[in-house]
Amino acid sequence: MDSSTTDSIPTRNANISLRIMMEYLTAYENVNSPESKKLISILKRELSILCKRADAKNFKDVEIHRLMQGSVIAESIALYNYPNNNSQIMFLNNDLGPTLEKIFNDSDSFKRLSIALGNASIQNAQIIMGTVEISNISDLHQFVQCTVNFTSLTVELEDGAWVCVGPCQKNPNFCNQQGECQNEINGPQCRCHSSYFEKYYGAQCELYSRGAGFYAVLFGCLVAFTLLIIVSAVMIVVFYRAKR
């Protein structure tokens, strides 16, 4: 069974608005100003730590979109990748929001950020979850591709995840149980079983022939049987003559 990869999947987004009790600088109006870049770098680092706590496996990034006055309001988006796993998709859709709210409503969560900003007070953290882009594992099908570009592989849903399956998995009897099936670039190939006494061959190991060992044993048995008959005949003749 070959692995699969997911590309260009929509993310589960959480819009986070954070009020920071600190002086608002006019330079913050331009996100590319040195002052903005310094503040954004601190915010991105500390918010990433908090957002990763909600779901470390699927967390992708935090983007700071703008800084507004009042004292400083930072509007950001936390991005989470939709995984190739139905239970994790359900968590992102149903439980990510409450988990983030629990983290951001805990005043202890902002101690590091407060210290990094000169002991500024952090207030009014607001979280609004974005639109659900992937409702379940079925919606992920169009984004899944096989990592190995074999023409015979297809994407199949198994045990709550998309996997790449070849003809060998879909048809366990492809080699007629007389060989090992392997998925190759041009399709399935059989490595037929063979031994000293017998061998299988053909595209699907459907043909059979005796091996050299079989004929060697057969010939040996025939020779032994012939010798036994000759010895027995000689003994009978000798015994018959001696009796006469």
Image (tube, grey):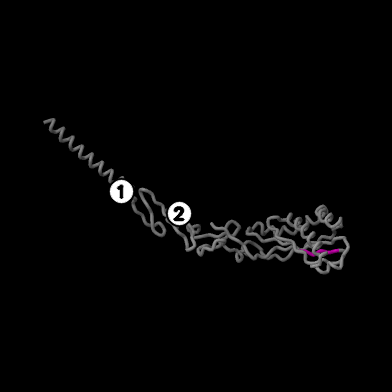
Residue 205: percent from the left, percent from the top? 40, 56
Instruction: Give the image location of residue 207, x and y in percent.
Output: 37, 57
Relative to 71, 240 lies left or right: left
How far across and down, in percent of the image, does residue 67 sit?
82, 66
Circle 2 sits on which residue? 180
Q: In terms of sequence position, does the residue under pointer 2 or pointer 1 come before the other? A: 2
The percent position of residue 121, horizontal first and vertical second, equals 86, 57
Our reading of the magenta stretch's main secondary structure is strand
Residue closer to the observer: 91 or 43: 43
Q: CA distance from mark 2 to mark 1?
A: 26 Å
Dividing the picture into quadrants, the one containing residue 91 is bottom right
Q: Which residue is mark 1?
A: 215
For the point 78% across and 61% down, the residue is 41
Residue at x-position 25% and y-position 43%: 223
Q: Which three-letter amino acid code belongs to the residue tagged 2?
A: Glu
User: Which region shows up in magenta?
Assistant: 72-76
